[in-house]
Amino acid sequence: MAIEIKSIPVVTGKDAERFVKVAEQNYKNKSNGLTKEESEKLKKFLEKSRNFTF
């Protein structure tokens, strides 16, 4: 028995313009959402994990 494939909704008008504007801003302001302190902790953790051997 086949399952119907639903069509993908298309964003148009002002909603589409707003979506593109926000997407471009997010691309320019690449932020991972971490504070500076959290970023430093993550950096140290990743550095230690790279040097880990069995």
Image: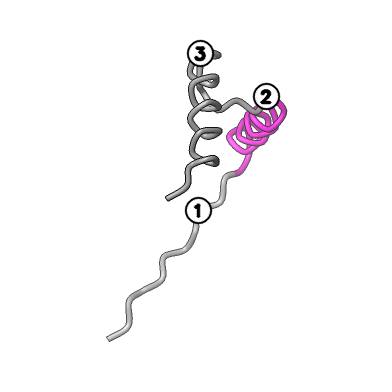
Three-letter amino acid code at disc 3? Answer: Glu
Left or right of 54, for residue 28 = right
Is the residue 52 above or below the residue 29 in the image? Answer: below
> Residue placed at 60% from the left, 25% from the top?
31
Tag 1's secondary structure?
Answer: loop
Q: Quadrant of the N terminus?
A: bottom left
User: Badges 2 and 3: C-beta atoms under 8 Å apart?
Assistant: no
In primary-sequence order, the first of circles 3 and 1 is 1
User: Badges 1 and 2: C-beta atoms under 8 Å apart?
Assistant: no
* Residue 7, image x, y percentages: 47, 63
The region drawn magenta spans: 12-29
Q: Nearer the viewer, residue 52 or 23?
A: 52
Three-letter amino acid code at disc 2? Answer: Asn
Asked if the magenta segment contains residue 20, the reply would be yes
Tag 2's secondary structure?
Answer: loop
Q: Nearer the viewer, residue 33 or 21?
A: 33
Q: CA distance from mark 1 to mark 2?
A: 27 Å
Mark 1 or 2, which is nearer the eye?
2
Q: Nearer the viewer, residue 6 or 28?
A: 28
* Residue 36, image x, y percentages: 55, 14
Which residue is the site of mark 1? 9
Left or right of 22, for residue 2 = left
> Residue placed at 54% from the left, 21% from the top?
39
In primary-sequence order, the first of circles 2 and 3 is 2
Three-letter amino acid code at disc 1? Answer: Pro
> Residue placed at 64% from the left, 34% from the top?
23
Q: Nearer the viewer, residue 19 or 39?
A: 39
Q: CA distance from mark 2 to mark 3?
A: 19 Å
Classify residue 11 by image quadrant: top right
Label 2 packing within 10 angstroms: few (<14), some (14-19), many (20+): few
Which residue is the site of mark 2? 29
